[in-house]
Amino acid sequence: MNNNNNRNLSSSQQIRAFALVLFVIYLSLLFYVTLFAWNYGASLGAEGPGGRNYNLIPFRSIYRISVFSKDIMDPITILLGNIVLFMPFGFLLPFAMKQLKKVILKVTIAGCIISIFIESSQFMFTYRVANIDDVILNTFGALVGVLLFVSLRLIKRRVIIFYNK
């Protein structure tokens, strides 16, 4: 019986393994949506008004979307969508990290790097707009996700300490 217990994973190892599988699935979907899926937004292919272009001025498109949108749904869909898109990144990546020291900084920087990779790839390989504002919003989404991870971890520790008293 003792030999069987050694083969079984602990519950924390099972959670970590499950989170890693979810993270790989999430990354696959993230790259599909941002690089291979439909062409939404300002660029509509080679013949469209956007074509292959970029914005390197921080907060320019955030301002334009916020001020000049026809209704409230455009800013919610575009701006909030970029934040929500990277929240799973910030939440799931810490499960892959062995050392959780400075996890907030590490995950936020990793989110920024992945976002820059995606935006650069959109500019080089698709007819989409590479936008610094997307990098800002995606990085903020990764930060929100890792803060949620850290918060839930602290709550879990306090609950365990409370019940062990």
Image (cartoon, rainbow, N blue to C red):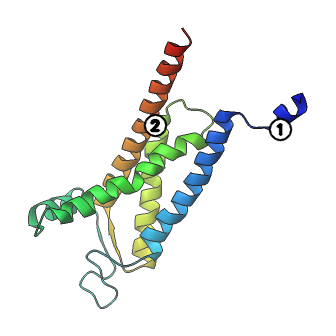
Secondary structure under tag 1 reads helix
Earlier-in-chain disc, 1 versus 2: 1
User: Which mark identifies residue 111?
Assistant: none
Residue type at numbered disc 2: Phe
Front residue of 24/11: it is: 11
Tell me the quarter of the image containing the C terminus: top right
Q: CA distance from mark 1 to mark 2?
A: 28 Å
Front residue of 45/12: it is: 12
Residue type at numbered disc 1: Arg
- Report crowding for label 1: few under 14, some 14 to 19, many 20 or more residues within 10 A (C-alpha): few
Residue 100 spot, x, y in % from top left: 55, 32
Residue 31 spot, x, y in % from top left: 49, 66
User: Which mark identifies residue 149?
Assistant: 2
Image quadrant of residue 79?
bottom left
Residue matched to label 1: 7
Where is 99 relative to 18, above or below? above
